[in-house]
Image (cartoon, rainbow, N blue to C red):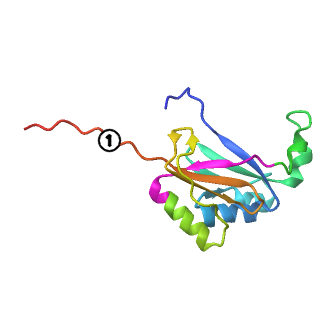
Amino acid sequence: MTSNSMRLDHVVLWVADPVAAARFFEESVGLEPLRVAEYAEGTVTFPSVRVNEETILDLAPHSVADRMRMLPDSADSAGHPVNHVCLSLPADTFDALRARLREGGVPLSDIGHHSFGARGEATRSFYFRDLDGNVFEARHYDEQPAATAPRDE
């Protein structure tokens, strides 16, 4: 990826309890919590969880909706979660996430196959909800085999 290509920076989720949401994403999904202590101390407006080195999920409490003034009627988005957020994982991490969610008693969809996404058709995918009802899809793609170098014989 080049430095000028577009990337997904963050998704803001409306949540009832940002600390509980951060705990869910850490313990059940395996994401790194960010700024949770600062949020609990009242020094930041919301905590986040890190998806990867470039992408985070912000966990915005409904109480900040009235301060959403970047666009007219932005506050009206509180309580209207996005349809779903999709996490793309390596196959082994996909399996570990599914097992961790199942162990935690999180309801899961059946595994689907060959759904289209950013990298083409995913090998497997499933859906789950977080504590606030936001829907997540987890998926993995078959990795392309590495080109083998010609052998000297």
Residue 84 shows in this picture: yes
126 vs 71: above or below: below
Left or right side of 145 for 74: right
In magenta segment, residue 83? yes
Give whichever of 52, 135 is nearer the camera.
135
Residue 132 position in % (x across, y down): 78, 60
Q: How many marks?
A: 1
Residue 48 position in % (x across, y down): 69, 53
In magenta segment, residue 44? no
* Furthest residue in direction left, as rendered: 153
Residue 70 position in % (x across, y down): 85, 35
Q: Amino acid at mark 1?
A: Ala
108 vs 64: above or below: below
Question: Looking at the rendering, which quadrant does residue 47 occupy?
Answer: bottom right
Q: Which residues are drawn in magenta? A: 81-93
Residue 150 position in % (x across, y down): 18, 35
Residue at x 49% of width, y 32% of height:
1
Residue at x 45% of width, y 59% of height:
92
In the picture, which quadrant includes the C terminus?
top left
Instruction: Say few, some or many: other residues with alpha carbon within 10 Å of mark 1 (under 14 / 14 to 19 / 20 or more).
Output: few
Residue at x 14% of width, y 38% of height:
151
Residue 48 shows in this picture: no
Left or right side of 2 for 69: right
Residue at x 86% of width, y 48% of height:
78
* Furthest residue in direction top, as rendered: 4
Q: Disc 1 designates what residue?
A: 146
Question: Looking at the rendering, which quadrant does residue 40 occupy?
Answer: bottom right
Q: Secondary structure at mark 1?
A: loop
Give whichever of 60, 86 is nearer the camera.
86
